[in-house]
Image: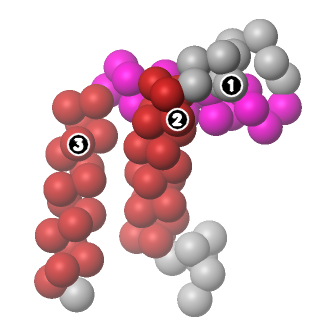
Amino acid sequence: MSALFNFQSLLQVILLLICTCTYIHELYPKLFNSQKTGLLSVFYKFARIGERLSPYVAIGCFIMAFNALSA
């Protein structure tokens, strides 16, 4: 089943995208810029969410990990 039709898989994809964009933004800060438009601006927004809400993102990662292990 596709991640678009399964809500749990969609949440996992979004959470991994947030974590990945935050990590890449810390390594290469000029890659994701707030002035860019298009797809890179979406990645910049995911990186900002990961930076500002990092405790909640970490809790979400733990919940998804335990959920995946129990399945």
- The answer to whether residue 18 shows anywhere in this view is no
Q: Residue at x 64, y 35 (%)?
A: 43
Task: Please provide the residue range marked out in magenta.
Answer: 38-53
- Residue count near mark 1 (Cα–Cα under 10 Å), binned few <14, some 14–19, many ≥20: some
The percent coordinates of residue 34 (x first, y second) are 69, 13
Q: Nearer the viewer, mark 3 or mark 1?
A: 1
Disc 2 element: helix
Asked if the residues shown at circle 3 and circle 2 are in contact, with their CB atoms under 8 angstroms apart, the answer is no
In the figure, residue 70 lies in which quadrant? bottom left
C-alpha span from label 1 to label 2: 8 Å
Mark 1 and mark 2 lie on one chain; the one further toward the N terminus is 2
In the figure, residue 46 lies in which quadrant? top right
Label 1 amino acid? Leu
Asked if the residues shown at circle 3 and circle 1 are in contact, with their CB atoms under 8 angstroms apart, the answer is no
User: Is residue 56 positioned above or below 3 on the image?
Assistant: above
Label 2 amino acid? Ile
**To which residue does mark 3 refer?**
58
The percent coordinates of residue 58 (x first, y second) are 23, 42
User: Is residue 29 positioned above or below 43 on the image?
Assistant: above
Disc 1 element: loop
The percent coordinates of residue 4 (x first, y second) are 62, 70
Label 3 amino acid? Ala
- Residue count near mark 2 (Cα–Cα under 10 Å), binned few <14, some 14–19, many ≥20: some
Magenta-drawn stretch, dominant element (helix, strand or loop) = helix
As drawn, the label of residue 24 is 2
As drawn, the label of residue 31 is 1
Furthest-top residue in view? 35
